[in-house]
Amino acid sequence: MRRPVVVGNWKMHGSRAENARLIDALTGQYPAKAAADCVVCPPYVYIQEVGRLLRDSPIGLGAQDVCAENNGAFTGEVSVAMLRDVGCEYVIVGHSERRLLYRETDQVVARKFAAAYHSKSLTPILCVGEQLADRDSGRTHEVVARQLDAVLELCGAESLERGLVAYEPVWAIGTGRNATPEQAQDVHAFIRERIAARDGRIAAATRILYGGSVKAGNAAELFAMPDVDGGLIGGASLKADEFLAIAAAARP
């Protein structure tokens, strides 16, 4: 049975004081034997300090992005080795904001996923998802397949033994509009079938998260879908009570 996971993507939010209050609330209430894994992904500059605050807690530490290169003249970039050096266990790659705002192609995202996967020390979280125009024109599966296939072709299905996939319909991120549980299930099932075409065992074990305006009020309904294994949470992850309620809604 797949163990659920809930990942908080803080995006470009937080301060040392705000982070300390949030982590204190989370670690004080998140049960050591929770039914779901829980991860927070702060901005780069706070990763090491948040990791210190999380010490001895069951909550994992992740980053919001990573460079595909190991080292060198890449001003402003951060490598897999650097993330591990400050305690990261997870890293998000291919978030829709990186794809749209920073023009990251499927190939760039696949190389970032590969860098994390081949390091054998970071769990990559691959984000895939369509824009509203794609949804309205019936191209959702086509777009998701293209994004997923870029990673499968570069790294093989076996890379998902340690990696996660997060389906995030772009039209539902930060808009207050989320996919219905049935819409989420449709795409999650499609992703699993796409992986199964290469390796059925890995497909059955791959954890696929939903991201897009997940709140305490809709989490249980979304997570009840058979192929939804948790969530990639944005704004709600900045509110301890909301994030804890979402995590509590995740059940195997």
Image (cartoon, grey):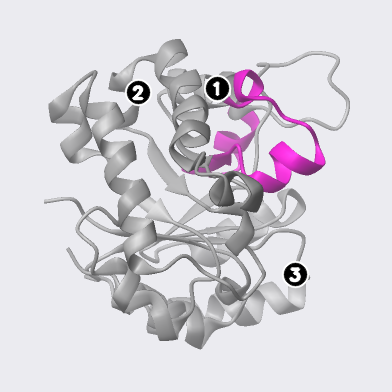
The residue under label 1 is 110
Residue 195 position within the rendered picture, expressed as x and y whole percent measured from the top left = 28, 28
Kind of residue indicated by mark 1:
Ala
First in sequence: mark 1 vs mark 2? 1
Residue 70 position within the rendered picture, expressed as x and y whole percent measured from the top left = 66, 16
| Placement of 75 over or under 136, stated as above or below | above
Label annotation for residue 85:
none
Q: Which residue is depicted at the point 59% across and 44% down?
A: 134
Q: What is the CA distance from the residue labelled 3 to the residue labelled 1? A: 29 Å
Q: What is the CA distance from the residue labelled 1 to the residue labelled 2? A: 11 Å
Q: Is residue 223 magenta?
A: no
The residue under label 2 is 159
Q: Is 120 positioned to the left or the right of 42 in the image?
A: left
Label 1 element class? helix
Q: Does the magenta stretch include residue 99?
A: yes
Which of these two is toward me, 218 or 207? Answer: 218
Quadrant where the image shows the C terminus: bottom left
Give the class, few, some or many, for how many residues have Cα within 10 Å of label 1's Cα (few <14, many ≥20): many
Q: What is the CA distance from the residue labelled 3 to the residue labelled 2? A: 32 Å
Residue 86 position within the rendered picture, expressed as x and y whole percent measured from the top left = 61, 42
Label annotation for residue 14:
3
Label 3 element class? loop
Which of these two is toward me, 201 or 79? Answer: 201
Q: Quadrant of residue 200?
A: top left
Between disc 3 and disc 2, the foreground one is 2
